[in-house]
């Protein structure tokens, strides 16, 4: 889930929208037939919740609202021409879901999803073919007591020795993340020399929660992202650039050295968190490149009640870096090898500890 402005154009979802070239052939034939007086050959309109209407509705919603056609090199008209004719009034729901999922898979976008009462589709190729670079069981071997948790377990913390703290945020789907960070910082104490902040495999959630968490690490207002929302149904219709600003937040503040651990599983609102942390002083990102999915999906209900989520903005880092489909590279790249795993070593965490200690010892 990502917060954001609602779209202000487009048909009601439950009305059939524009269709691509191949399905238009039937409409043209129907018009010719009508002009020739052969009304008996015309088919009555499909019920709005029939499989063809549902398929056309999904095609139209994506066509009007999706924001990354050119980035992903997707010819949506061709996809509609190929797959929409495969759906007939007698297509069973299971097969209809399969066809619609294949259409969405062509976008190669983890934020373009489909939900029915019994099934869920989302593209996972953005992380499934990449090294994980995170073994939760390994982390515990580096921690000392005490340990704590907050926000329903989405925030946990402990000590690493040498005056360093460890803080993990596993998701931004849970409410109260900012307050959880407050609790962690209060527990770890003002004498903490440095902090390792672990967001590996955090698939995102709400950017309000990610901003709240990042707000605990700044003493001043700072610009951290630029967004443009879709402003009309044309594929290149976008509104003006809007700056996103991070505000100091919460009852606790930590301005010492921080290393943020990343991997390919960092996505969506977790990448927003990275965008914010990257512009703050004394912050170093360590690990692997993130998943590269900014998204901000909006839900659109189809005529049969199924829901398709459609990404509807574009986002850049504060310095203008465009990372959709590419990801955010860390300041210090580390890959966990098979040999590391055999030994139970988290080499990303180890690199972060060295970086934070060097920063703390330098006094800079």
Image (tube, rainbow, N blue to C red):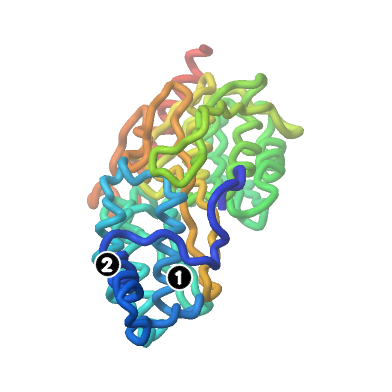
The spot of residue 354 in percent (x, y) is 41, 28
**In this picture, is 222 found above or below 306?**
above
- Residue placed most toward the observer, 54 or 203: 54
Mark 2 — residue?
A: 25
Q: Position of residue 338 (x, y in %)?
A: 23, 52
Q: Is residue 250 visible?
A: yes
Residue sitting nearer the eye, 51 or 288: 51
In the image: residue 73, left or right of residue 92 = left
User: What's the residue at 66%, 26% (across, down)?
Assistant: 191
Q: Secondary structure at mark 2?
A: helix
The residue lying at 67 percent from left, 41 percent from top is: 178
Position of residue 146 measured from the top left corner of the image (x, y, whole percent): 64, 46
In the image, 28 versus 66, the foreground residue is 28
Mark nearer the viewer, 2 or 1:
2
146 vs 348, left or right, is right
Q: Tell me how many marks there are.
A: 2
Decide: is 39 above or below 9. Answer: below
- C-alpha distance separating marks 2 and 1: 32 Å
- Classify mark 2: residues with Cα within 10 Å, few (<14), some (14-19) or many (20+): few
For residue 120, the mark is 1
Earlier in the chain: of badge 2 and badge 1, it is: 2
| Rendered location of residue 322, percent (x, y) | 38, 31
Work out whether residue 220 or residue 351 is closer to the camera in this orientation and state it.
Answer: 220
Q: Which quarter of the figure has residue 59? A: bottom left
């Amino acid at each position: 889930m990502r917060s954001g402005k609602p779209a202000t154009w487009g048909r009601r979802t439950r009305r059939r929208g524009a269709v691509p070239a191949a399905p238009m052939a039937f409409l043209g034939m129907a018009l010719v037939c009508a002009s020739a007086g052969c009304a008996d050959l015309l088919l009555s309109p499909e019920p709005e919740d029939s499989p063809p209407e549902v398929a056309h509705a999904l095609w139209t919603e994506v066509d009007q609202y999706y924001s990354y056609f050119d980035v992903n090199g997707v010819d949506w008209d061709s996809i509609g021409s190929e797959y929409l004719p495969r759906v007939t009034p007698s297509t069973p729901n299971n097969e209809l879901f399969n066809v619609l999922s294949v259409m969405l898979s062509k976008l190669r976008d983890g934020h373009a999803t489909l939900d029915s009462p019994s099934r869920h589709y989302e593209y996972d190729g953005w992380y499934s073919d990449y090294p994980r670079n995170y073994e939760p069981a390994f982390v515990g071997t580096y921690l000392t007591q005490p340990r704590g948790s907050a926000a329903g377990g989405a925030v946990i913390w402990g000590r690493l020795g040498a005056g360093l703290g460890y803080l993990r945020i596993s998701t931004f789907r849970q409410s109260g993340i900012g307050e959880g960070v407050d609790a962690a910082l209060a527990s770890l104490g003002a004498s903490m020399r440095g902090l390792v902040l672990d967001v590996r495999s955090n698939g995102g959630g709400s950017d309000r929660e990610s901003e709240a968490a990042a707000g605990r690490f700044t003493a001043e207002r700072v610009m951290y992202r630029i967004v443009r929302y879709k402003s009309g149904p044309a594929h290149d219709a976008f509104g003006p650039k809007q700056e996103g600003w991070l505000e100091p937040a919460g009852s606790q503040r930590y301005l010492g050295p921080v290393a943020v651990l990343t991997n390919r599983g960092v996505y969506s609102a977790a990448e927003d968190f990275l965008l914010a942390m990257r512009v703050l002083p004394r912050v170093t990102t360590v690990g692997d490149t993130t998943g590269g999915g900014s998204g901000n999906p909006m839900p659109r209900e189809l005529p049969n009640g199924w829901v398709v989520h459609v990404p509807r903005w574009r986002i850049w880092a504060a310095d203008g870096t465009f990372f959709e489909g590419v990801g955010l590279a860390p300041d210090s790249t580390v890959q966990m090898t098979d040999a590391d795993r055999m030994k139970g070593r988290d080499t990303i965490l180890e690199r972060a500890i060295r970086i934070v200690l060097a920063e703390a010892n330098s006094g800079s």
